[in-house]
Image (cartoon, coloured by chain):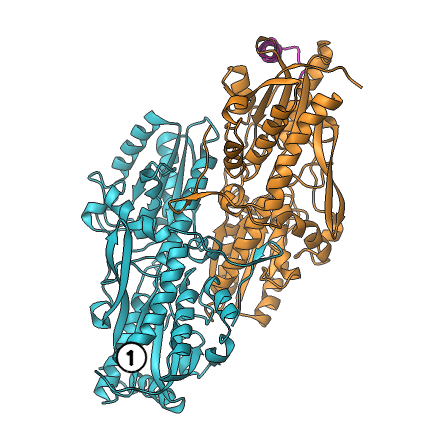
Chain colours: A cyan, B orange
């Protein structure tokens, strides 16, 4: 049992937006308000960048009221702003790198910050790991507690059963796919519609397109995931088989599918640009396939990129996802304040799918940072072009329940910080 | 007052899907069930094509139950299927053209059809007009009543204040725009996001992107409509002004914007393909602008095509739109059966915007077919890059209220016929 640590706390959001990342923020706020070890909870604007620039807001004051908290839960995209800053290695001996960490811990001290909560995905857990390591080397590990709180629509974080934000994105994808299939089914002419879904390295979100197939709803004819290499001739052969059944084929493809030689299918239309974490920018996978299918079959072909709405459509968030996101934010505060956890990430452990039951635990952030969790083999069919029932059983509990944002003048009412 | 006409009725859906076209179908079903002049209401599959092939379903039997009707109201895209068949001129003396009309009226007789309801947009009203004209020339105008019921997300039909289906599409666009703007606002780097919205000849749907600006919600920085010619240099100048205010610019553009010389902005990426009505296929307007802005500003630029979801997202339908869509379908039956209307279209006449009040009337379909209703001048600002408050006042009542489709296993439950 660690000592009780009293002082201020700070929370930040990092990486790509989700429809549930503010629900997690609300959970941290609730946790801080109800925990007597924490005096003021600051919010850092634009993640670690804003932290270094002392761009803080007083969340304890702004969200003392439960009705304000409820509005925040339903607001999409990081209300505190985000960043994609990558911290240098804490082992670096370069003066400019050391200066970054010194600046960060100077701010810790100036604001009497004892608790640091960082809501984000893989890259954010990397930040948590580096700050923890630096604090340990400086011998101040006992006076600050640094916690990661997961978030990613990609669902590709290690250890956790699923990531907050994924359920809402999955619900958006599965619902929109149902609606697109209805739309495509109205004509009798032979046509192929290719829907591109986010997910660079793991096919979780694309897999969600197929859950309808196991519950009597509409689902695409074919699903292509980054976990299997993509072969154009096999794709054409599968389309021919699908045309034997009906004239309107709908295909779900992950933006991250690659040929056997490792080239991204969407690479054709992209420059080789990479972001600060070295990830390649991808777009246009469906567009490339559209051209290929048009050339091969000569029929009507349409490509649809679900694009940003799949990660920010809070109006269609999963109630389960929002509830769990609040719970995990709250649990992060409890783990740090009551159990002395630091350098750790809170995560979901699934106890059962039918009925669905999950509990929240925490683990070393080192077990999470920079690992990718992809679809297991038994979630993908033998042909590599569809999900299995086991996969649907995994996803379905996460999309259950409908969020109920407040509406005003016909539009959802979202809050700003 | 016309004679009472007893017999069977038939209803069809044509043109592009909407989230409310089945609500209108449900209105026709309700109208037929409650009107004693009508014995059986048939549904023709795939519009006039299915009519000629006698591909009928008995809607009176299938939807006798109100709970089935309610499920149909919330189901997107034409449940009976659609077509894009253009009828020949009823004045044509070509044998193959005369055969089309003879076949159609043979089916009328075989099924004792006295009432023909056709739900669709401009091209469908063209079909209603031609059938009416042919019936008049054949001297059978007294024994069949042919009615058009409007539908189009484009809202470009003449006479009617607005078209069923537009309100739901507008609500989707305005809501999604709000969410996209939240998403884009999380980073601090200079970026432009260009959102492409449907609407070939009229900017109604693109205009809906801007309503948030007048009710304290988020709205794009700039809006480009097909009613004004597009100038790339003026666009760049407007972007520069917008960057003075904030780093994240969001622009809404209609797929149908053109340069002063009449060329579509999106034409660059398109072949000159046209559909059977001679409409040019458009896509890629945002993509073309993305490249141009990237070249000019060198900043991050993203293009988003809202694509099919804007016309089939029934989960986000406007409650006002669905109610009105049911009402106008019902009114079409009453107009034909009780008032003897034929060769006419039912339409909305707005009595007031604040408070919103509308009534349903009917007019000759000849006043509607093949006319385009575009945004009036006072709905567009002087610079031609935004909507005015008058435009927002027009649109806002139409997006009011949230539809409540039934959900099962986390997905909306849609019906199939």
Up-down relation of residue A410 to residue A383 (above or below)? below
Q: Nearer the viewer, residue B227 or B156?
A: B156
Disc 1: CA contacts within 10 A as few (<14), some (14-19) or many (>=20): some
Farthest residue to the right: give it.
Answer: B1
The boundaries of the magenta stretch are B90-108
Left/right of residue A340 with respect to residue B337 in the rendered view: left
The residue under label 1 is A338
Left/right of residue B204 with respect to residue A39 in the rendered view: right
Position in image of residue B171 (x %, y %): 58, 49
Quarter the N terminus of chain B occupies: top right
The answer to if A293 sits in the magenta stretch is no
Position in image of residue B276 (x %, y %): 56, 27
| Prevailing secondary structure of the magenta residues | helix
Q: Nearer the viewer, residue B76 or B30?
A: B30
- Could you tell me which secondary element the residue under label 1 belongs to? helix
Position in image of residue A350 (x %, y %): 25, 57
Q: Nearer the viewer, residue B183 or B407?
A: B407
Residue at 42% of width from left, 74% of height from top? A29
Q: Is residue B256 visible?
A: no
Q: Is residue B388 visible?
A: yes
Residue at 59% of width from left, 60% of height from top? B219
The chain carrying label 1 is: A
Up-down relation of residue B248 to residue B54 (above or below)? below
Quarter occupied by residue A277: bottom left
The answer to if B93 sits in the magenta stretch is yes
Left/right of residue B198 with respect to residue A20 in the rendered view: right
Position in image of residue A157 (x %, y %): 27, 62
């Amino acid at each position: 049992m660690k000592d009780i640590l009293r002082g201020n706390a700070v929370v930040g959001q990092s990486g790509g937006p989700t429809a549930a990342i503010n629900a997690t923020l609300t959970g941290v706020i609730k946790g801080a308000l109800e925990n007597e070890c924490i005096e003021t909870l600051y919010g850092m604007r634009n993640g670690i960048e804003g932290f270094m620039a002392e761009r803080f807001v007083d969340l304890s004051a702004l969200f003392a009221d439960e009705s304000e908290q409820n509005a925040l839960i339903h607001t999409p995209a990081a209300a505190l702003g985000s960043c994609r800053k990558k911290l240098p290695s804490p082992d670096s001996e370069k003066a400019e790198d050391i200066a970054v960490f010194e600046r960060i811990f100077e701010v810790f001290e100036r604001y009497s910050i004892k608790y640091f909560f960082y809501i984000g995905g893989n890259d954010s857990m990397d930040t948590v790991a580096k700050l923890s390591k630096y604090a340990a080397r400086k011998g101040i590990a006992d006076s600050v507690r640094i916690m990661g709180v997961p978030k990613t629509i990609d669902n590709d974080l290690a250890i956790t059963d699923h990531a907050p934000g994924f359920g809402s994105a999955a619900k958006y994808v599965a619902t929109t796919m149902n609606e697109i299939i209805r739309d495509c089914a109205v004509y009798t002419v032979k046509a192929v519609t290719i829907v591109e879904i986010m997910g660079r390295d793991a096919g979780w979100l694309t897999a969600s397109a197929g859950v309808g197939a196991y519950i009597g709803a509409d689902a695409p004819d074919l699903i292509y995931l980054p976990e299997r290499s993509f072969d154009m001739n096999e794709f054409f052969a599968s389309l021919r088989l699908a045309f034997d059944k009906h004239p309107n084929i709908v295909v779900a493809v992950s933006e991250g599918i690659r040929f056997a030689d490792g080239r991204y299918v969407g690479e054709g239309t992209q420059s080789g640009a990479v972001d600060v974490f070295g990830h390649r920018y991808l777009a246009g996978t469906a567009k490339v396939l559209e051209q290929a299918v048009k050339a091969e079959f000569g029929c009507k072909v349409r490509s649809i990129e679900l694009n940003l709405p799949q990660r920010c459509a809070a109006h269609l968030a999963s109630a389960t996802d929002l509830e769990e996101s609040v719970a995990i934010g709250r649990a992060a505060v409890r783990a740090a304040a009551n159990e002395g956890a630091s350098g750790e990430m809170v995560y979901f452990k699934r106890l059962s799918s039918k009925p669905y039951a999950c509990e929240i635990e925490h683990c070393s952030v080192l077990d999470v940072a920079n690992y990718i969790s992809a679809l297991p083999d038994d979630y993908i069919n033998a042909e590599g072009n569809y999900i299995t029932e086991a996969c649907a059983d995994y996803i379905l509990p996460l999309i259950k329940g409908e969020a109920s944002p407040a509406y005003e003048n016909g539009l959802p009412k979202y809050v700003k910080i």
